[in-house]
Image (cartoon, grey):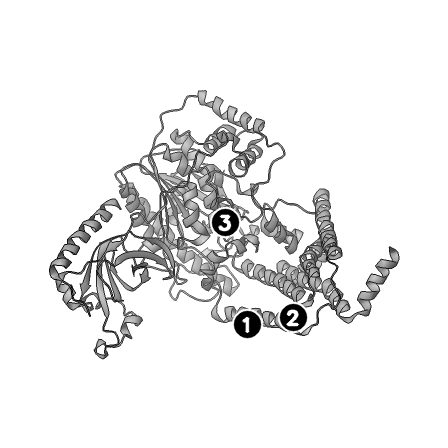
Amino acid sequence: MKDKIINYFKDIWTNTVKRMTLLVFLIAPLVAYTVAEALNQRSVSKFFGFITGRPITFLLNYLIVLFTMSFVLILKKRIAPMFLIACVWIGFGVANFLLKSYRETPFSANDLRMATSVMSIMDKYLSGPFGFFLIVLIIAAIILVIYLWRKIPKYSQKINYLWNIALIILIGIITVGSANIGITIGSLSTKFPNLSIAYQKYGFAYCFANSVVNVGVKKPKEYSEETIQKIKQNLDSAEDDPIEDAKTPNIIFLQLESFFDVNKVKDLELSQEATPVFNQLKKDYPSGFLYVNNVGYGTANTEFEMMTGMNLEDFGPGEFPYKTILKESTCESVAYVLRDYGYTSHVIHNNNASFYSRNEVFRNLGINTFTSVEFMNPTEYTPLDWVKDFVLTEEIVDVLDSTEEQDFIYTISVQGHGSYPTYEVLEEPLIQVSGIEDEERRYQFEYYVNQIKEMDDFIQELTQTLAGYKEDVILVMYGDHLPSLELTEDELTNENLYQTEYIVWSNFGFDMQGGDLETFQIYPKILEQLGIDEGIINKFHRIYQNDENYLKSLKTLEYDILYGDKYVYDGETPYVPTDLQMGTYPSVIQSVELEENPDEYLANLPKDPEIEKEPETETGENDNMRYYLVKGQYFSPSSCIYINDEKCETVFIDENTLLAKAEDVQNLDPFTVKHLWKNRSVVSTSEEYIYIATAAEQGTQPGTEQNTESTAGQETESAEQNTELVTES
């Protein structure tokens, strides 16, 4: 056996292709991981400190990269694929470095799961030249891989697949075994309360690999039907305690993007206070610190904890449940709990509907309507092209007015979103910034504080509007996370990067005890004060909040509800997905008419370059092109007319009027209005409207000759059909 092994390696060393392959196999993972880790540590000194201070951890990270490369052993051409895998790891390292420049949380597998969402806003993060440079590097790497694939010869001998697969398995066993030993002795961990610190401490490859395989709530050792039944019995026995009749005011959650009191930044000096309204409300209403899970990003995870009462720390490192379990499963939430008390649940967000897959996930959280920016008509934008929050006041009131019953409204703000420019953007900022020596960082703070000043003005406008509203309203306001301003704990008076603040405002004197809370404790705390007692998670927080096994039992419940046998529901979840309606009201087409004089509608609108460059119809080239005036309700600038499911050039006139340009429109052709994000992805589609031309219009339709009486009969029939559609919608 010894001679066979010696001869095996001799054969490798005497064969040029095999020798090169072995050297690349051993060196490429080392180079790739070294680059990725150096970018992760973000300084040469920290990188060498990591190698010398934690050499075993460095070796384990190398083994992880080596294991991913070992799969090329089943190929005859190996060097090019190995180079490709090395490039992927280096690319991940670059992505981690870039993301850490814009936010506090490092790159993980969840960023890949959110790739489609992230790509839609990457233009706000990467400048043109820098983005171009990255594309050039990617193309260069692809060309080099193709070159190596074509030029380097493949193995001439037959591959021993059994031996090579065994070798791959052996490398995997060594890697996993080494990780388990590290976890046992305490040099590694699978729980990352602070993801940024974990990446620095345990290494990029290990933490990234954890985010790939460690997803969801792991099955607790104590999980069993008996354990869940014991928890359930404790909840049921508490029903004997007297609870006052439930109060059911409208409840609004206002999640403020990257919002916090900048007075907590020690050396920062402002020409005037940035958030005077919020700071005064903190004194006048129940308030406190709110412990969140992310810094600089992770809005959806704050939403998840707020709406479900579940602890995100029980999930995989850096996981977004919106991109994993909630895409396939319903989950008990405040919306489902309030449904039993007659509430209708809504979400309002002045950004696109598909980001974080919200338009898919909200139906699994019991939401009835979702009004995203595609259904709004915003007129004010930040210099970075985020919609300003003032638009939300009218949208909130519209939702409150849309139903006769009580409403739960979850509102997601966006104005304070990063990344914040490192150059001068505001020529005459309302608030001047000083105390920050670094000029680029001072510009970032200057931009940020002027945005949150406007958000604070929005809070004042909203509370003043709701103060006079005809129904009782509770408004819960809070920041979703701290901004991506490279803050450190030493720079903050509260010395905590994971604390924002909340306020519970009301227009009817609602009172509750303030104090510091975890994000997942907010909604149960408010419902407890209102006497609303339904929902397993809601009851659990009320009964177990002072129990020594509080968080441990919460994790067991979370596993049972989302991944286990649902013992707490007697084996079957009581929650079914809602028929989520996009928009507070559905868009409806009520009439379509041929418009011979479109200029009167277009005169006061910005020129549409597509319309402006259209040649005159005298040449006959566009003889069939006509304008159609579409009348209806709840249109927006994102509305687009489709005829026979073909997209038409559409001009938004107002919320009741669209102007569509099309050719060859025939009687009985179906018209629909669709809401599009950035004129591409479809968010919603209206009911069909069947078009019938009037007798006068028939005379102007090119190449059309129809009997007037027949047309009139068709028109009457179509009008009846469309009336029915409008009534149903």
Q: Is residue 412 above or below residue 73?
A: above
- Nearest-to-viewer mark from 1 and 2: 2
Q: Position of residue 285 (x, y in %)?
A: 39, 38
Q: Residue visible at 20% across and 67% down?
A: 598
Q: Quadrant of residue 535?
A: top left
| Total marks placed | 3
> Please, what is the three-letter code of the amino acid marked with disc 3?
Lys
- As drawn, the residue found furthest toward the left would be 709
Asked which quadrant contains residue 239, the reply is top left
In terms of secondary structure, where does tag 1 sit? helix
Q: Nearer the viewer, mark 3 or mark 2?
A: 2
Residue type at tag 1: Val
Question: Residue 323 got which mark?
Answer: 3
Residue 183 image point, x, y percent:
69, 44
Report the front residue among 82 and 112.
Answer: 82
Q: Which residue is label 1 attached to?
A: 136
Alpha-carbon distance for marks 1 and 3? 30 Å
Indicate the position of residue 687 as horizontal and vertical percent values.
28, 51
Q: Callout 3: few (<14), some (14-19), or many (20+) C-alpha neighbours within 10 Å?
A: some
- Residue closest to the eye, 173 or 119: 173
Q: Earlier in the sequence, mark 1 or mark 2?
A: 1
User: Circle 2 is placed at which residue position?
Assistant: 149
Instruction: Pick the residue in front: 231 or 158.
Output: 158
x and y, in percent, of residue 650 in the image: 28, 63
